[in-house]
Image (cartoon, helix red, strand yellow):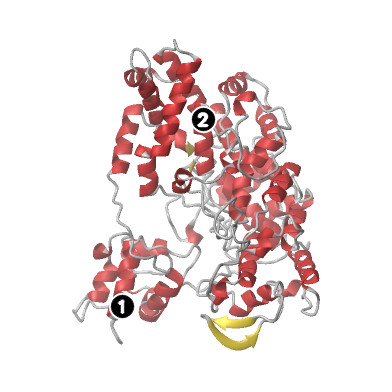
Amino acid sequence: MKPPLTLAASLLLVVSFQSAPAAEPKKDIDFAHEVVPILKAKCAKCHTNGTYKGSMSLDTRAEAIKKAIVPGKPEASELIRRITSKEKDTRMPPEGLALNEKEVATLHEWIRQGATWEPGFSFKARTYVAPLKLTKPNIPPAAPESTHPIDRLIGGYLSANKLTRSAPQDDASFLRRVYLDLIGLLPTPSESRAFQADSAPGKRSVVIQRLLGEQRSYADHWLAFWNDLLRNEYKGTGYIDGGRKQISAWLYQSLLDNKPYDKFARELISPNPESEGFAKGIKWRGEVNASQVVELQFAQNVSQVFFGANLKCASCHDSFIDHWKLDDAYGMAAIIADKPLAIHRCDKPTGRTAVTKFLFPELGTIDPALPKAKRLERLAELATSPANGRFPRTIANRIWHRLMGHGIVHPVDQMGDRPWSPELLDYLASYLVDNGFDLKKLIEHIASSRTYQAKAVPITQEMADDAFVFRGPELRRLSAEQFIDAIWMLTGTAPAKATAPAKIPAFIDAIPSERRLVRTTLVDCDPFMRSLGRPNREQVVTVRPEQLSTLQALDLANGQILTTTLARGAANMLKADPKVTADILAERVFLQALGRKPSTEELVAARGLVGEKPTIDGVADLLWVIVMLPEFQLIR
């Protein structure tokens, strides 16, 4: 991996961000409903599912961009050239009617917008059938440097793929990664120095256990993960008129208590008054599409969150992107319906009424004659049944993705797809079950492996799902919350109080004073948080965008919120130590932000920014350049 950029190089990087194109799309093209039907009708016969005339495949986005499309550049895309050609030898399709103007315009605009593809979708026929029952794998025997079960399974996988294990991470990088992953904050300079000076062989395990033992820090950090997943926000659509309900207090206390995950899920599916906001969904004002009513929201959300099953398409018609049917979505929706639920296809009544049905009927049935509360109890029972391996697999896969950058099944909401290591996935799911659905134990187990503690590998280039090969933990960008918390901690600019949840216990563990701050997860979203990726949470969000957007680049380069925050931080630093020198300032900032001292070259650059007599503007410039460094913005 290349060394971190210097301060000067970072400045050039940000200038390049500012020059990025910022064209606004006309409207978002719906891949599943607008693009797939065209490709199926006009292109699939010759370019998908084993037939690839001209060596051109449209099975997946990764295959399509090899020859057919150039995302963002329709005029440079072979697909557009062929479908608009007037020449008999080059026009596509070669037989039958050509695409009409509307179809051409749709594909043109779709490519211009970046050729967004439904995660996990392929035109290739699916042959893999995901099993429901868990199977405990045979773990390879221990070796002198591979005693951890995860490492033994990964060792066998790497050998089978003729790959070598990534080298171990150095102490400083490990500490920064594990702090950000487990509690979402940077280690303090004193914590970094103490860890690196410690020569005890088991010090990494000790710090993992200590961080997971900080109940408040853990809850503050993982609240963002669960707010996204359970579409829980503190204000916004539906809260004013009662069409939506928070679960913040219940969720926060559940994280503090490390509530067993099976119990956690049951309380969401068959809820109490404090946890019912998830099941209730959002009651939109006015008329909505039949697939957006609260009953269908329930079916979509429960299936996506707990089983990694995407029912959004199947809520309108039999899915284009996987095997789920309209009756599957409506069967789940009927469980929570207060009255007979009429089935609509593409918003048109079919004349049929939904019948209660669990997504995996082989595990059991739900009597439609039961009162709604009893139907929900039965659903919660089936969802968390020991026979339902899909339930622990899904959360084990999400945690692995969170810590490693790529799911064992990827995308994480396509749990019917083939894992790159079925043995590892079932091992992690079984480990979770055997340890009483204790998510902290699962996190600790993964984090204590050599696999997690290895050097990060570059972010995987887009490829067909069946072509992915695991090489190690991937480089990851800081989340909006991690980025802003790091800046607040660095500059002493955190808010004085939280805005939600309403009841936050006082600090309940021995958290160092430098890390006692109101966290981003506990305050209302602002435009800067939104541009960095914090979603509005009107829908379930299981994975945030990983690529830097133009809006993010502009906000990082000269956005008012970041600029003001850094100026306040600079003032705080100078007020705390009016006689501080540029060298001392630089060393403090580097240690806090990056966990290391500045190099000679960086120190010279810092002096140039701060000036002989430090000023607020000079110190703010130094802070800005540091937080622009990829070394700061990436989890390595």
Residue 73, given in percent of the width and then of the height, sits at 28, 60
Residue 435 in the figure: left or right of residue 596:
right
In the figure, residue 60 lies in which quadrant?
bottom left
In this rendering, the label closer to the viewer, 1 or 2: 2
Contact between labelled residues 2 and 1, with CB atoms less than 8 Å apart: no
Query: Where is mark 2, residue-wise?
Result: 493
Up-down: is 5 above or below 466? above
Residue in the picture at 57% in, 50% down: 401
In the figure, residue 283 lies in which quadrant?
bottom right
Query: Where is mark 1, residue-wise?
Result: 102
Residue 137 in the figure: left or right of residue 398:
right
Residue in the picture at 54% in, 43% down: 473
Q: Secondary structure at mark 2?
A: loop
Q: Is residue 615 visible?
A: yes
Quarter of the image containing the N terminus? Answer: top left
Q: Is residue 400 visible?
A: no
Q: Nearer the viewer, residue 590 or 172?
A: 590
The residue most toward the bottom is 351
Q: Secondary structure at mark 1?
A: helix
Q: Earlier in the sequence, mark 1 or mark 2?
A: 1
Residue 296, given in percent of the width and then of the height, sits at 61, 72
Up-down: is 160 above or below 560? below
Q: Which mark is residue 374?
A: none
Q: Residues within 10 Å of mark 2 (few under 14, many from 20)?
A: many
The residues tagged by marks 1 and 2 sit, at their Cα atoms, a distance apart of 52 Å
The residue most toward the left is 87
Up-down: is 87 above or below 122? below
Q: Nearer the viewer, residue 51 or 589?
A: 589
